[in-house]
Amino acid sequence: MPLRTSKPAQPTHLNRRTFLGASLGAGLILALEACGGTSTSSGGSGAGGTIKWAWQLPTTWDPVTSSAGSDVQMLALAYDPITALDEQGNAIPWLAESWKYDASGKQVTFTLRTGLAFSDGSPLDAAAVAKSIERGRTQQGSLIAPQMKTIKKVSASGARDVVIELSEVDYQYPLLFAGKTGMVVNPAAFQKDAAALATQPAGSGPFVVTKYVQNDHASLKKNDHFFAAGEIKVSAFDLYPQADPATVVAAVQSGQYNVARLGGAQVQQAKDAGLEVQVLDSMFVSVLDVHTGMAPFDDPAVVEALKFAIDREKIKKVANFGIGDVNYQPFPPGYVGFDPDLGDVYAYDPDKARQLLADAGYTDPVPAVFTSSGFAPAAVELIQAQLKDVGIDAKIDTIPQTQHTQLVYIERSKALTYDGFAGRESPVQAFQVLFGSEGLMNPSRTSSPQLEAQLKKVKETPTDDPAYPGLLQEATRIAVTTFPNVFLYLTPSIVARKGVSALPASPSLRRFEGVTTS
Amino acid sequence: MRTLRALWRIPSARLALVVLLGVALLAVLGGTLAPHDPLHQYTDDVLQGPSSTHLLGTDYVGRDVLSRLMEGTRLSVVGAVEAVLIGAVLGVPTGLASAWLGPRLEWLTLRVSDTLVILPFTVFAIAVAGTLGNGLQQAMIAIGILISPIFFRVTRAAALGLRKVQYVEAAELMGATEWWTLRRHIWTKVLPNVAVTAAHATGAALLVVASLAFLGLGVTPPAPTWGGMLSSDLGYLAQQPWAPIFPALLMMATVGSLNLLADAIRDATGATEAPRRRRPTPPVREERRDGVPA
């Protein structure tokens, strides 16, 4: 007879109560599993971790049809530009290890690194780069084509040299190619189905998109074919839209994200929660776009009064919690186009603003409509109050963010709008966008012969010429003092991190080389 | 007056009326009674907690929260009342007409009502604001249109019940015009139902107005509204976690009081009681001789 050491197992009777209990337990386990989601599988340390960034999703994953300047940040995860920018805004090698203009300044040759490959493993050679540039400048609906108007011909010379012939002297291309314009798209992808690029990018950047759910998230994995793949220390990158201010800190604390963009109001909260807070310089300048074809800004006196009516320091202190720097021009200090001689050219002077209006014959408050797409409500309301104080009675008109570009820049139906300029890789490109007769962010579409002439000089001057900074800064001075745009302050990117190492400083593009998770 | 006296005898109605009277006073006199200019920005005192100077503290640009709540009552309540009035004006006459003016109109009004019922409030209001521009009037028109089927259905149901009562038929037989009958016999019976519906609908409209303001629709800043204040407070929870409580409490108290009042009106007037109909003549059944129905 076998020795029994424990009670024999009782037969299980599956009655209704047992069944319900078991179901509840199984459901609970499944629910907890679902809540855990990717965090358990994607967590990890050092090499192999996942960056989960609540940042922004691009309008499209195709750099040729991208309609937002800020898209370049997300596109740079999947694509490599031909060049890059250093902290001063100078062009530095990226896919191209060097470039050289001929003596006439009408031909530039970019020499690619050796051994480059797209994320699918196919070679990224001069022929592919030439085809990609050609597509960008010729495809119908291309939004980067206007920037490449002066390109006459693009060709490959051997496996590594891309030769660009220009219709006029233009030394801006190495800078221009550091952004969307220079992002190289795999020809095999766009020759097969260019429309698919909107959701399935095909580049050579540090990551490859494996899943993209529009308006929700994008999952990316490390691209082993990236030329600096050894510098990428994480195995995956999950990209999410910007988190709600009310929940962003809790979301990082809980591990839903491990990097998230913060507003000034959340900085102290994030610090108190034990998160790493990093303030990253950016080229983002808050600005008031003014349509001088619409009343009351069709009167130069009102525009001049507007520039002196705004207490930028106060807005920075109240709306931005003191973060950022007051700025009166489209470039940040230290950037080659920043003109230090402008100083505080439009420093807050309400008396002068009132006097300007009085001299122009305004005795009653000047009615105006002030358009906002809902972001930075504190800044918008402060500006409205400051305008009222000098005699401009601006009524706030809130429009949906999704209609902002259409209403303000395409239909040009708004007289005064609060917005921001994210900067451009080439300063001439920035001038064209802000002050050009076809510039998207120039609601008036007015131009200045004086500025055009100065920009011609800038384009015709090599960027390493000692005269270049002076010419560029003169262009800045002309633009700031003759155009109606009211530049307000620089807005740095503030991020909260948890378990992610510090992000490299880079005012133009966020880079992730060397970033680790723990 | 008789109805009011009947209402006052109900304790919950007394509570609701007192709260609503306070809200009404705030709506009318809030801006005048406010201790500060609700739009004045004390930019050196941003996001301050309650103090003797600012009893409920200051908001993100230094405005006095109490003053904004008082001033915001007007826009919030007026907006809701406006929407309900639009709903009643559209819904009540069509409800009566539907019951009274023949099957073709009945069919048409029912189909329109069915169509409106399936439209979600917020989405429709956003669409209207997107088409006609972002403003309180546009949003209220949208909400009023969507509320109208509620009035339509309640009015129609009550009127249908009264259509066949004996005194109405008697009036018609004696040569009373339809207009006279409607005015004399129908309207007075329908009114309590409309009043109950209006009280409920005002509460619902108040919440929709607040929801739209929360989304940035309807009232444009810096004008204060309860929903708008609630929305902006959420961006500064780290600094003022208590701030959303004030507008939320006001909303809860007002909507709760309106619901209590609606119930009380129903109890006081018997609005939900089915109107007494003429008893139909029971069908004559043939019975078998053994008493079992055939």
Image (cartoon, rainbow, N blue to C red):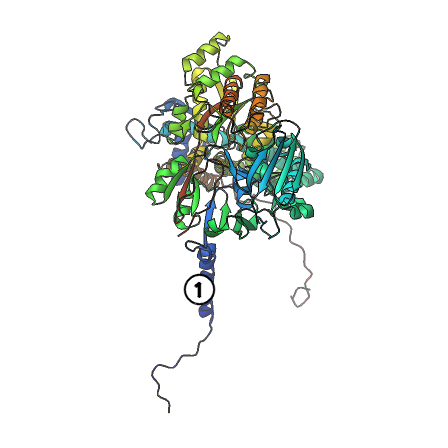
Residue B277 quadrant: top right
In the image shown, does A465 or A193 lie closer to the viewer? A465
Q: Horizontal placement of A192 versus A340: left or right?
A: right
Q: Is residue A323 above or below residue A504?
A: above
Taking the view exactly as shown, the residue that stands out farthest to the left is: B52
Q: Nearer the viewer, residue A11 or B34?
A: A11
Question: Which image quadrant is residue A274 in?
Answer: top left
Amino acid type at mark 1: Gly
Please provide percent x and percent y for residue A301. 51, 12
Instruction: Using the rendered view, name the quadrant where residue B290 is placed.
Output: bottom right
Residue B89 shows in this picture: no
Q: Which residue is mark 1?
A: A25
Q: Disc 1 is attached to a residue of which chain?
A: A
The location of residue A408, given as percent across then percent down, is: 57, 27
Name the quadrant of the N terminus of chain A.
Answer: bottom left
Numbered circles on residues, count: 1
> Residue at (43%, 12%) from the top-left corner?
A352
- For this orientation, the residue located farthest to the bottom is A1
Residue A51 in the image: state x and y as whole percent. 46, 49
